Image: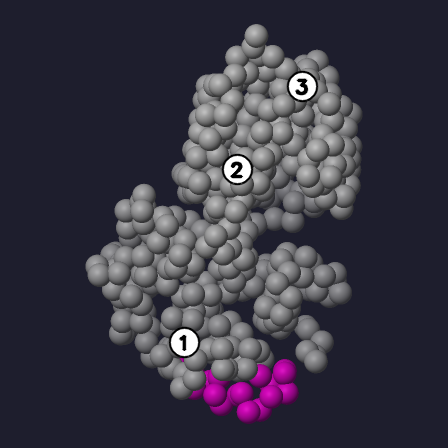
Amino acid sequence: MTPPVRTARQIAFTVLEQWRDTGQFAAPLLESVFSRNNELSAADRGLASELTYGVIRRQATLNAVLKPRMKRPPEQVEPALWTLLQLGTYQLLFHSTDSQHASIHETVELTKWLNNARWTGFTNGVLRSVQRDLENQFVAVAAADAIPLAPEHFLKLARPLLPNPSTDPSGYVAAAGSLPQWLVENWSNRMDFDQMLRMSMWFNTPAATWLRVNRLRTDGDTVIAALESAGISATLEEDGCMVRLAGTAHVPSLPGFNDGHFTVQDPSATSAARLLAPVPGQRVLDLCAAPGTKSTHLAELMENRGQVVAVDSHPERLERIAPAANRLGLSIIEPVLVDESGEDLPSGPFDAVLVDVPCSNTGVLGKRPEARWRLEANEPTRLARLQSRLLEQAAETVTSGGRLVYSTCSVEPVENDQVVSRFLDNRPDFEQVQRHEHVPGQPADGGFQALLVHKGN
């Protein structure tokens, strides 16, 4: 049984163990621990979050660095001990605000907190070994003895611990960029080494927080002014529709949140509603709508006039739509629970339909750190079958001459262009008018949207 937690590193270890044992998302696990430790400072909360998400993101890199030091394969090492070693190694490699001595000392202290003296000397020895492999210098190019931190910025190692990028580029990106090998191999069929490496760097960078301005209640300049008055640095982007925070923040505590001045949404995700471009007075269907971020965007674009029918098959997530709409001052959204089969969709016709389908999340692996390790090689193909069915069902509700946007947060062609192409082959009464493909890191998350228009009678 884990003893009571009091420090950021104890929290990170506890949450990482729960994540490994249960497969739950880290965010609610962290929030649960935070809620039981109200005395924690904002700095400690931030450190606990950084260490937790960092270790989850960097699993493959940490394992590559640790394995040569072990006499047994990782699966034969006690899981909690392996978590400790990963946590200490992450701090040595990636947490630059701590000295190497402090990183080792604090990790060794965790063995005492766990009351496991047998691990103390072993943990100290392994982390000292990692420390000896760090040359405390940086190089500008990828190599088997260099870990990527940012473009043209690699941490130099004393010996090669990673695959050689010249002979095994996919292996290097998978290990150094901490991604599933099968996923990188898929990417290598359509991307060069530099593209894959840049994407992996983006996915290992803590995601920026973007706020979509609710123009029915305020404007971007007002949001920026309120944030700056609270000492929060931010920039206004995307024609004044989006605010990018310079650092992390507890969004519900930001000035203007309770007044409905903004909601959290990445720019690539906002393009779905903007591409659909509903107008006031229309009847709009949002398929797979929960938790309602895109539904509220649609309602804002419609100036809160008309009807947005927000459909989902998950009751717990659907319940989050009404509070979000109320906070933003939106009254035209009607949440509707449907069966997973989609056979009981609200009857059309709808002037505009958004189908934001479940997907592999390969465009947002930075924002959803756990997603990369949940994915299996056959998942994009399996999801494509579901996506095709949802697109076909959505099309049945579109009025003559109406608009339909197909949207994902994936960068896999099998989930994007191939789904749309197959649909158009079967539905000659629709045509693709626009297509948006968002590359991760340029400048936000990745994703895909296609605008399909019914040709009419």
Residue 113 magenta: yes
> Which residue is more in the foreground, 385 or 184?
385
| Residue 72, above or below 272 | below
Q: Is residue 131 above or below residue 252?
A: below
User: Is residue 176 left or right of 51 when viewed as pictured?
Assistant: left
Up-down: is 344 above or below 148?
A: above
Instruction: Kindly tell me whether residue 375 is visible in this rendering.
Output: yes
Distance (Cα) linking label 3 and label 1:
56 Å
- From the image, tell me which residue sits under label 1: 66
Horizontal placement of 355 versus 409: left or right? Answer: right
Residue at x 40%, y 66% (from the top left corner):
61
**Nearer-the-camera pick, 133 or 341:** 341
Give the camera-side residue of 159 and 60.
60
Residue 312 magenta-drawn?
no
Magenta-drawn segment: 111-128
Name the residue rendered at 48%, 52% in the picture. Answer: 378
Q: Secondary structure under badge 3?
A: strand
